[in-house]
Amino acid sequence: MRISERAQAIEPFYVMEVAKAAAELGKTVAHTERPMVYLNIGEPDFTAAPLVQEAADRAIRDGATQYTPALGLMPLRERISDWYASRFQARVPANRIVVTAGASAALHLACLALIDAGDEILMPDPSYPCNRHFVSAAQGKAVLVPSTAEERFQLSAAKVEAAWTAATRGVLLASPSNPTGTSIHPDELRRIHQVVQARGGITLVDEIYLPLSYEAQFGQTALQLDDALISINSFSKYFNMTGWRLGWMVVPEKLVPVIERLAQNLFICPSTVAQHAAMACFEPASLAIFEERRSEFKARRDYFIPALNALGLTVPVMPDGAFYAWADCSEACKKLGVEGSWDFAYEVMRRAHVAVTPGRDFGNFETRNFIRFSTASSMAQLQTAVERLRAVLA
């Protein structure tokens, strides 16, 4: 069987490769005094809020399970619009909101709608690996631009301007970012967007972790800039609905029928049950729960980052959102006698029974020196991980 060049060009998602290895080892130590602590996957340990679960049950019971419009249920789009107004004081009309089968489908649709073969999209290095593969799937090319701690591991307007070529189509940013948990300062984002707009390009911003911002200066949606920008969002992280596979995107009005045509052909519609359930996310009782959980994620960050720094696993930039720690493991590698974060990850998995993610997935610029920790696990799990890492690194 001949495999397409497109498929062959997609690298493995090493996050999941490491996860499989951790799961296998986890089975052998599950009933010992030191079961595996999983800090490798960015999935909240919270599940859907009670009203969301009840809404899903009700939809199934009432037979509300047939196809919806490709753009999603209008009542859900309206609730998302209202949420932007109340949470961010941003006017986002419901007719510009497209509900999708997760943020992944939103990114896929956006790339197919806007990228032609050979188009280049600028992205920071490090960044979430799947984002560059959406660009590749549209026959574009992701151009990774090295970013430093001084730049919060994000692109700057100056670097976008310097990297722009005749082939550049636009930028794909994430704020807050996976793997670093850092955001672009709103002023810098405005300057980046101005550079892109001046060249007739597109600005795509992945905002799936935006509601999990911990600092007011960063907790602002990019949609406040203008109507030309495209935002990607999700019910997975803040709303704790990972396996429900539901997200949305906000696009310029003239792009809506283009996205609709693509969605009709590629996805038909997002999950009907998930859509009915998601409407309950915006009930006051649900929002109160999500805010309590956001406070818990912040408390975990506030404990874990100083603990890592004390272990010599230095986090150069304090995450201002999401639930990740991007830690330099160079000194720790020397202590363990290993080279690079890939070997470090397997060594602490074996010796400490702590699963972490090596930097290999997230780019090329110094990523072999970094480990991504997920702080989406409970405080007790984080404390156990710190104790075990301290023992191994002592």
Image (tube, rainbow, N blue to C red):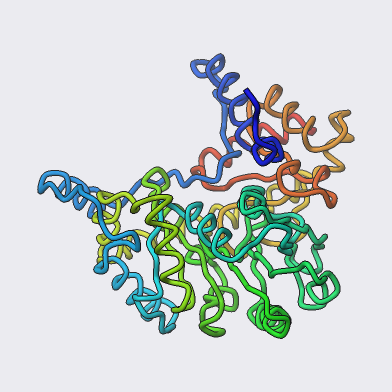
Q: Quadrant of the image for the C terminus? A: top right
Q: Residue furthest front?
A: 2
Residue at image coords 86%, 30%? 338
Query: Front-most of 94 and 151?
Result: 94
Work out whether 223 lies above or below 25: below
Q: Position of residue 69 (x, y in %)?
A: 28, 60
For residue 94, what is the image quadrant? bottom left
For residue 333, what is the image quadrant? top right
Work out whether 390 lies above or below 33: below
Q: Position of residue 66 (x, y in %)?
A: 20, 49
Work out whether 206 lies above or below 189: above
Query: Front-most of 128 and 212?
Result: 128
Q: How many marks?
A: 0
Residue at image coords 79%, 30%? 343
Q: Is residue 59 left or right of residue 286?
A: left
Query: Front-most of 269 and 227?
Result: 269
Q: Quadrant of the image for the N terminus? A: top right
Q: Position of residue 324 (x, y in %)?
A: 62, 52
Q: Position of residue 258 (x, y in %)?
A: 46, 67
